[in-house]
Amino acid sequence: MSDNTRTTLLIGRIGALCLLGFAAAYGIAASRIDYAFSSDPLGPRVVPLILAAILCLLCLLYLRSPGTAERFPTGPLLWRVLAVPVLLVISVALFEPAGFAPSIFVLTFGTALIFGAPVTKALFGAIGHAALWWFTFAWLLEVYLPAGALFD
Amino acid sequence: MNLEYLWQGFAVALTWQNLLIGFIGCFIGTMVGALPAIGPINGIALLLPIAYTMGLPAESTMILLAAIYCGAEYGGRISSILLNVPGDAGAVMTALDGYPLARQGRAGEALALSGISSFVGGILGSIGLALFAPLLSGLAIGFGPAEYFVLMVFAFATLGSMVGSQPVKTLIGCTLGLMLATVGIDATSGAYRFTFGEPELGDGIEFVILVIGLFSISEALIILEHQGRGFTVIRDLGRMTARMSDIIFCTAATLRSSVIGFVVGVLPGTGASVSSAIAYTTEKRLSDTEGTFGKGDVRGLAAPEAANNATACGAFVPMLTLGVPGSGTTAVMLGALMLYNIQPGPMLLVERPEVVGGLVASLFVGNLILLALNLPLVNIFARVLTVPNWLLVPGILVLSIVGVYSTHASVFSIYLMLGIGIVGWLLRKAGFDMAPIILGFVLGRVMEVNLRNALAISGGDISILFESTISIVLWIMAATIAVLPALLAHRARKRIKEAALSA
C-alpha cells in the first residue's frame, strides 16, 4: 500500500468517525427534544432519530471503504489556509463597530497578501475593494451596510 | 397542450427591466463560468441574496439566476479551450478536443463553434422544457403527501446511484442536508429543535447562509491550496468565426447531444458533467471511425457543449413541476423560490404562471443574448482568465459577507456562514460533493412535512405510503435505481473474472 493510499484511508476513517460522533450527538439531542403536544402521530423527535440512525449506518459503510480523499495541506500552506478564516473572524468582529469599509479593507488586504500579492498591490487592491463594494452596495443598490463609528 | 403560460412568460421576460436583468445575468454568468475556480452555484449563491435584498420580484430574480446558470454553461468552455482547465464540471469533456484545437491555432474557431453548439443545445433544451413542464405538472397534480414523500425518496435514490463515484458519500451528504433542515422551531408541535438556545436559529438555518458557506467560503480555501499550479493561457485565438463546413459536419452530433443532454437533465441528481460525458462517448462510438476524437475533432467539441446547455434547461423540468431539483444549481434556485415563499411543485404552473413562464421564456431570450455576447465578445471573456487570484478571491469573500449580511443584518449569520464554510472545506477534502447537502437541505423540510401529513391522514398507518399506484411505481423505480448499479458492477466484475480465467 502506497503512502498516498494510506493517508487517504486514514483521512476517510477519521472523517467517518467524526461523522459517527456527530450522528450520535445529533441522535441524543433529538431524543431530548421537549414538546407538550403534536397534532401528528410522529411528533418532532422521530424524523431526527431516523436520520441519526441512517447517518450511523452510512458512516459504518464509509468506515469500511473510505474511498478517495485529498491530502490536507501541511507546513506553510496549512498556515496560509488557516489564516483566511482567522482574517474573516477579525473582519467580521470589526464589521459593525468599525464599519464596512475598514473591515473589508482589513479582509481584502490580508487575503491578497496570503494569496501572494506584493504589499503595494495588496494595499491598492484593498482600497479599491473597500471603495468599489461600498459604492456598489451602499450607494448604488442601497443595501444596508454598517457605516461604523468613524463615518456615522 | 396549453402553452398559455409561455406567452404570458414572454410578456414578462420581454419587459425592458427583465431584458436588462437577463443581459446582466448572461454577462456575469459567462464570466463566472469562464473562471475555473467559480462555478454557476457560486455565482448564483453570491447574487441571490443581493437580488432578494434589492426587492426584485420573484420572476425577475429567477430570470437573473437562470441567466447566470446558462451563461456559466456557455462560459465554462472558454477556460476548457484556452487553458485545458474546465470552467465548470459540464465543460470537462469540452477540453478533450477543444484544447487540441486551440493548440493547432484554431482557438477562435473552437470558441465560435462551441458557442453555436451551446446555443443549439440551449434552444432545444428550452423547447423541451416548454413542452414537458405542463405535461409533467399535469401528471403530478394528483400527488398527495404520501406520493410526495415517495417522490423525494426516489430523488435521493437517483442521487445516490448517479452522482459521483462514491455513492455512500453522496448519501451521507444528503443525510447531512436533511439533518440541517430539521434545525429550528417545528411547525406542528412548536418544539425547538437543535437551536441550543440561540434565537437566530429559531427559523432554522437560512438557505443563503448554508449555500454561501458551503460553496463560496470553502471554494476560497480550495483556490488557495491549488493556486501554485500554473496554467498557460493560449493567447493566439486565430480566426474568430466558425467555418460553415464545420458547422454542417457537427450538425448531427449537436442535435443528438442536445437530446441526450435534455433527457439526462430531466433526471433528478444528474448534471451537466454526466450528460456531456454520455454525449461525448456516444459520439465517439458513433462517429470516431478515424480515431480523431481527443486530437481536435470538432464533433468532440460540439457534442459536450450542446449536451451541457440542454441539460441546464432539462434540469428545470423536475424543479418547476415536481419541486425536485435536477441538479445542484437548480437546488439553489429552488431555495431561491422558497426565499420568496413560493412552494415549487405541480401547482406552481397554475398559481404562478408568470414565474414559470417568465423563466422558460427568459431561457429562449437568454440563449439569444448569450450567442450575441459570446461570438463577438469572447476576447473580453477570455481576458477574465488573467485576473489574479489575489484580486478575485477577496472579491468573493466580500460578496459572501455582503450577501449574508444584506438578508439578515446580523453578524451571527456571518459567523455561522464561516463555520459552515470550514466544515464544507473539510468535507470537500474528504471527497464529499456539496450539491447533495444542498439537495437534502432544500428537500428536507418538504419531505418531513409530507411524511407527517401522510401519517396524520392515515392515523399513523404506514401503509398509506404504499397504497396508491403512483407510490408503488415510485417505490419500484427507487429500488431499481438504487440496486441496479451495484448489480451491473457485480456482473461486470464477474465477466472480467471469467475472461481472466479463460485467458
Image (cartoon, coloured by chain):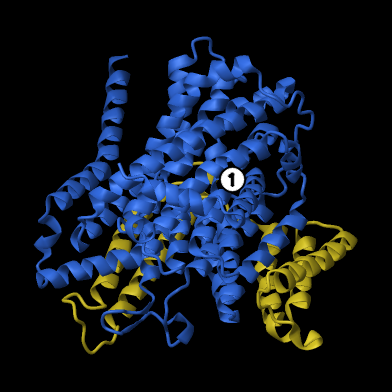
Chain colours: A yellow, B blue
Residue B339 in picture, x, y percent from top left:
46, 68
Q: Residue B323, relative to residue A146: is it above or below?
A: above
- Quick check: B177 left or right of B363? left
Q: Nearer the viewer, residue A144 or B331?
A: A144
- What residue did someone put label 1 on? B72
Q: Is residue B359 visible in this depiction of the protein?
A: no
Q: Quadrant of the N terminus of chain B?
A: top left
Residue occupying image coordinates x 42% and y 79%: B203
Residue occupying image coordinates x 74% and y 22%: B105
Residue B110 in picture, x, y percent from top left:
65, 26
Read off the chain for label 1: B
Q: Nearer the viewer, residue A83 or B104?
A: B104
Residue B422 in picture, x, y percent from top left:
56, 66
How many numbered marks are there? 1
| Picture quadrant where residue A122 is located | bottom right
| Picture quadrant where residue B162 is located | top left
Query: What amino acid type should be assigned to the residue bearing mark 1?
Result: Ala
Q: Residue A26, relative to residue B490: is it above or below?
A: below
- Quick check: A38 left or right of B87? left
Q: Quadrant of the C terminus of chain B?
A: top left
- Quick check: B477 left or right of B89? left
Q: Nearer the viewer, residue B218 or B271?
A: B271
Q: Is residue B108 visible in this depiction of the protein?
A: yes
